[in-house]
Structures are given as structure tokens and as C-alpha cells.
Image (cartoon, rainbow, N blue to C red):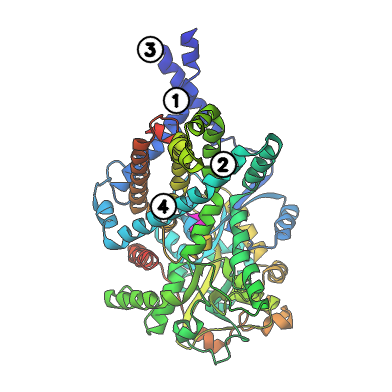
Amino acid sequence: MKRKFCLLIVLTLIFTTIFTGCKNSGDKAEIKVLNYGQYIDKTLLTEFEDKYNVKIIYDIYPAPEDMYTKVKAGGTDYDVIITGEYMIERMINEGMLAKLDYDNIPNFEFVDEKFKNQPYDSNNEYAVPYFWGTLGLLYNTKAVTEKVDSWDILWNEKYANRILMMDSQRDTMAVAFKKLGYSLNSTNEQELKEVKQLLLMQKPLVMAYVVDEALAMMIAEEADIALIWSSEAASAMGSNENLNYIIPKEGSNIWIDAMCVPATSSHKKEAELFINFMTSKESTLKNIDELWYSTVHTEAVKEVEEFLFDNPAFNPSDEDVKRTEMFRDLIDEIKVYNKLWTEVIAD
Amino acid sequence: MKNKAKLLTYPYIVWMGLFIILPVLLVFLYSITFNEINNIKTISFTINNYKMFFTPVYIQVTLRSIYLAALSTIICLALGYPIAMIIANSKMTSKSILLLLFILPMWMNMLLRTYAWMTILGNNGLINTLLANLGLPTLNLLYNNGAVILGMVYNFIPFMVLPIYTTLSKMDNSLIEVSEDLGANKVQTFIKVIFPLSLPGVISGIIMVFMPAVSSFVIPKLLGGGKDALIGTLIEKLFSLGDWNFGSAVSIVMMFIILLSMAVMNRFDVDKEGGAGLW
């Protein structure tokens, strides 16, 4: 009996050590970067490695919530995370991020004042903006001949089964909030009730709730109107000239993706070096060239190619931007949003 | 000697404990608590997750999943049985080619095959382009329950055909000859002899199709357009939103649905040859 027990313990130990893996420690410093998929010009990574003799381990995640779950669960040792502002706010609130040492990030001065000291990080202590964008409507001018300037078109029966909404509760709910004239961070019970009603009313007209598929579907003219992020709209418009992007007059959402350093990072200095490198004009231009995302860089924006600069998705008017609102971390209230959204798609 | 053979089972017992029993227990623990379960001191139990599940909205999701899975299973059986008979009765050489052709698509990634259906069914897809060129009105084929059922039938039909084919080809031919000698016609032979004898294959076919169909999440997500949640997509949604507790409760309920359906099928499986013998 005793022998059996020993054997069980030994085997358990073997299994657990196999799956924890081994740590590789060379003389080269090493940083781990966690980013969305397809959100960097990868040649920049090797450029950084060669220039500073630092090895980069690059990892990607599908959605901010997945990233959060992974990092929160512990056991990870990322040094730089690039993610959305509301997620950064949540991580700041939970003490998961380290304060940055701006002496190591001189390029921070090139970040447009518009994007500094935003509510998610009010004294800009934790995160350096990477790209920004808006939420709006991408529509096919061949199919939609009327003037598009309002979210109301998403409730127009003429476009039944030709409308793409987002399978991302905050974005889709933001539309309903704005259409009703409320804040997109509202936690007012009555307002949430109205939002749910509105989304349920719209559901029969919706072709599908998607996230990543919208871009390809709009290019292929599978749908007429899509709720979409400006960054994706810009690249869709580059591939199909019938497409146009607008930010509806009722207002919309503005987002900033930023680079931050987790409190658990063991190579903070190299992490800051990386952030500084990514914020340089040359890196930013390279990244823009690859991604077509709106830049926060005051110098790089002057050298953006004209076709991109004139694109309303890449460079929306100040007036449009004024009507936008940023997502805030809702802390526990997010559960109410989650419940509402699951009930909408379950109905 | 016998003892040594016993030793060989330990790795599997450890494996089972670590990767099957422990995770199920953890899922169960999540389902009866709220918030984190990392800290023993602050752990707090509740049955609210289950209470919430038994509200009309989520019951509707469950019924919708069972309905779609059952319908897919019936279609698979209706299509699969004749196919299995054709393969079992064909000549040796063509038999292996037919079988190969049947299994060949399964060598390809399921996600890829499902994406292929999206380009076939889409508004500007193969079928609608054809219809438009013929001057016919186009149809909304993608992003509805029909597309989900089609995807399930397409993906799961080999699981129906193969077990039926196995029982049919194992069948003792003399029994069929006896039936014919005694004056039964083809239809009678099929109803009284062939079909009852192939029942174990049918049962395991039904289970092998119904189980993945009721819990499937990729197919409804891609072909259903995320509109009408099924139990599989609901669980995925809840976990990605971070509501592990309610998500776990839904998973446990789904396990019970599958166990229950296996128990029901077990009643019909006299020989215990099908997968229902697991029960």
C-alpha cells in the first residue's frame, strides 16, 4: 500500500514538473511583450532586439478580457502589455500595473496632449498611448443611398438582414446608449432597461453579431452597414472604394490602446526602453504603414501619406471627436452589462 | 505478474485524477460559489447560479440547443443509414474507396470546413451567385438555424455512418438468407431482421452525433452569427466575460443533459455494444 502511494506521489511530481517547464537564463536580457493579434509591424521587434541586445518574447491575445483573465490568474511574467484603456483602468484600480519612469521614455513628449492625462490614467503615470480610434458606421454607398448621419439607420427595416453588429457587449450597447442620448457608461437601471428593449427590437434586423469577420464581409459586400472600429474601417476602405465611414451625430465611443508595464515585471527598465522605442517617430511611421491605425504621435502624423490622412476613419474631424466618450471601468457594474448582453443574445 | 500489470495503470489513474476528475470538481465548485475560489477563507456558497439558469431565458436556450441537436441527429440518421447500407453492401474495392471518401474530409480542420460553408451560403456566396445569374431571387442562407443544422449534419454525419456501417458489415448474412427463405420480402427482412440487429450501431451513432451537437459552439458561432445563443455558445460567452461561476453552472447542467440522454439511449441498447454502455 505504502509503495503504491509513493508511486502516485512520484508520478504526480513528474507530471507537474513537466508542465511547468524550465526557465531559460542567458546573459541577454529578455522581455515578454503581450499584444493583440496583428497589432504591430513585426520587423520592429527584430529591430529592437538588434539595436538594444534584448531578446523579445512576443505573445498575443484575442480580446482584452482574455488577457485580463490570463494575467490576473497569475503565473505570467509579462513586461509590456498593450491593451485598451478601460482594461488599463481596471488593472490600475486593482494594483496590477507599475508606475512608469518617464526618464526612460523621453519620446513621451511626442504623444499628443489630447491623449495624455485621460480619465483612465488621470496623471498619466501608468501607460503610454499606442494608437487610438473611434466606433462608427461603415456602409456601402452603392446599397445605402440615403444620407447616413445617425445610429437610427441600424433600426431601419429597409436594411433587415444586411446589418452587422458587434459581438462585444460594450460596443453594441454603446450604440443604444448614444441613440437614446445617454452616457455609454450609464449604470442607471431605467436606462439599461431601455437599452435592452432597443437591442431586442433591433435583433430581428441584424444579420450577425461578429467582431473579426466584419472587415472581410464589408469588403466582400456581404452586408450593407456594419458597426465597426475606425481602424478596421480604414483598411476596409482601402480595399473597397464603395465603403464609407462616419461617426453618427448622436456621438460615439473613442478608444485609446496604450502600453503598460505589469507590477510583476522583472525587467522594467528594458520594458520602458521598448515603450520608448515604439514611441519614436520612425517606429510609429513603420507601424502606421503596416496597420493604418490613427496615431497619437505629433510628429509622425505630419508624415502620414495623404490618402490615409484624408480618410475620415484614420483622421476624423475635431467636431466628430468632440462628440465621443471614452469607456470607463465599471468595476462590479460590468456584471449588469454582461447579464444584459447574454440575455439579449439568449432571447 | 498480475501485480505488474496493475502498476501500468497508475499513470492513467494519475492522468485521470489530474485532468478529468479534478477539473470537473473545480467546475462544480465554481458553480456553487460566487466570485473567486482561490482563497478558502473568503469562499462563499450559493445556489443562485442554478436558480438563475432555471429562468425562462436560459431554459429557452437549453430547449433550442436540444431541439437543434435532436433535429440534426434525426437528419444524420435518415441520411446516414442508407449511406452505411450502400457502403456495407458494395464490393470490397469500391467499399474501401467509399469509406476513404467519407473519412477524407475529417482529415481537414473542422474550422476550415465550417468557414468553407460560409463562403458557399453567404449573400454573395456560391449558391446566391448562381441564383442571381439564373435571374432568381437570392436567399438568406447564412446566419440562421438552418445554416447551423446544415453545419452540424455535415460535420457529424461520419459519426453516424461509421458505427452503423460496422454493425451492418459484421452482421451474419445467413440470418438474412433465413428470413428470405421463410418468405419475407425485402422490406420485411429489413424491418424484422436487419434494422433490429443494427440497433447497437444506430444507438452509438445517435449518441456520437447528439453529444457534440448539443454542446457545439464553433458551428453556431460561425454559421449562426452569434444571434440565438445555444448552450455551447452561452458557456463560451460567460467564460470570456469572466463570469466563471454562472458559466460553470451552465456547464454542469449540460453534463447532466448529456448523461441523461445517454441513460435514455441505454434503455434501447440491449447488447451494450454501443457507446451507451458507458452509462
Q: Chain of mark 4?
A: B
User: Disc 3 vs disc 4: which is toward the camera?
Assistant: 4
Figure quadrant of residue B242: bottom left
User: Disc 1 vs disc 2: which is toward the camera?
Assistant: 2
User: Disc 4 vs disc 1: which is toward the camera?
Assistant: 4
Amino acid bearing label 1: Ile
**A234 displayed left or right of A320:** right
- Residue beneath the point at 47% across and 37% down: B184
Residue designated by label 3 = A1
Q: Nearer the viewer, residue A142 or B25?
A: A142
CB atoms at circles 2 and 4 under 8 Å apart? no
Residue B85's mark?
Answer: 2
Residue B70's mark?
Answer: 4
User: Disc 2 vs disc 4: which is toward the camera?
Assistant: 2
Which span of residues is magenta-colored? B216-221
- Residue beneath the point at 34% across and 38% down: B263
Marks 3/2: CA–CA distance: 53 Å
Helix, strand or loop for disc 4: helix
Amino acid bearing label 4: Ala
